[in-house]
Amino acid sequence: MNPTTLNSSRSPSEVERLARRRAGAKMGWYIHAFVYVVVNLGLVTLSAARGHSWAMYPLMGWGLGLLIHGAVIWFVAGGGFYDRLVERERRALAGRDRG
């Protein structure tokens, strides 16, 4: 069992702490994505104004970092997708135990 998975055996304070931690991690990604868009729009504008195409390199490099950051937040560290998969498996296993 993943220690970051919410379940009924956690105390309300543990649930609150974990929820705040997850929300903080997701907020960090939103800030990362916002800065990525703003900075890279500026770089693309600057690059185009000078007749160059060098802005694609920071777009791709930083974009890969943003993609990895998002994957860790939403898929690995107990984001919504992961939690839904775990919950689905719990229901499936509970159904087998009854049958």
Image (cartoon, rainbow, N blue to C red):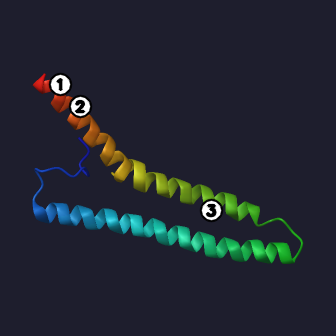
**Quadrant in the picture for residue 14:** bottom left
Q: Which residue is mark 1?
A: 96
In the figure, is residue 65 to the left or right of 72?
Answer: right
Q: Position of residue 50 (x, y in %)?
A: 87, 76
Q: Which structural element holds mark 1? A: helix
- Which of the numbered marks, if any, corresponds to residue 62? 3
Q: Position of residue 85 (x, y in %)?
A: 33, 41
Distance CA(mark 3)–CA(mark 1): 45 Å
Q: Quadrant of the C terminus?
A: top left
Q: Is residue 77 visible?
A: no
**Quadrant in the picture for residue 23:** bottom left
Ranked by sequence position, the earlier of labels 3 and 1 is 3
Label tally: 3
Q: Is residue 67 visible?
A: yes
Q: Which structural element holds mark 2? A: helix
**Quadrant in the picture for residue 19:** bottom left
Q: Position of residue 44 (x, y in %)?
A: 75, 71
Crowd class of label 1 (few under 14; some 14 to 19; many from 20; radius 10 Å): few
Ranked by sequence position, the earlier of labels 3 and 2 is 3
Q: Which structural element holds mark 3? A: helix
Q: Position of residue 57 (x, y in %)?
A: 73, 61
Please name whichever residue, 14 or 37, is drawn nearer the observer in this view of the structure. 37
In the figure, is residue 31 to the left or right of 96?
Answer: right
**Residue shown at the point (41%, 48%) measured from the top left:** 75
Crowd class of label 2 (few under 14; some 14 to 19; many from 20; radius 10 Å): few
On screen, 52 above or below 77?
A: below
Q: Which residue is mark 2?
A: 92
- Which of the numbered marks, if any, corresponds to residue 53? none
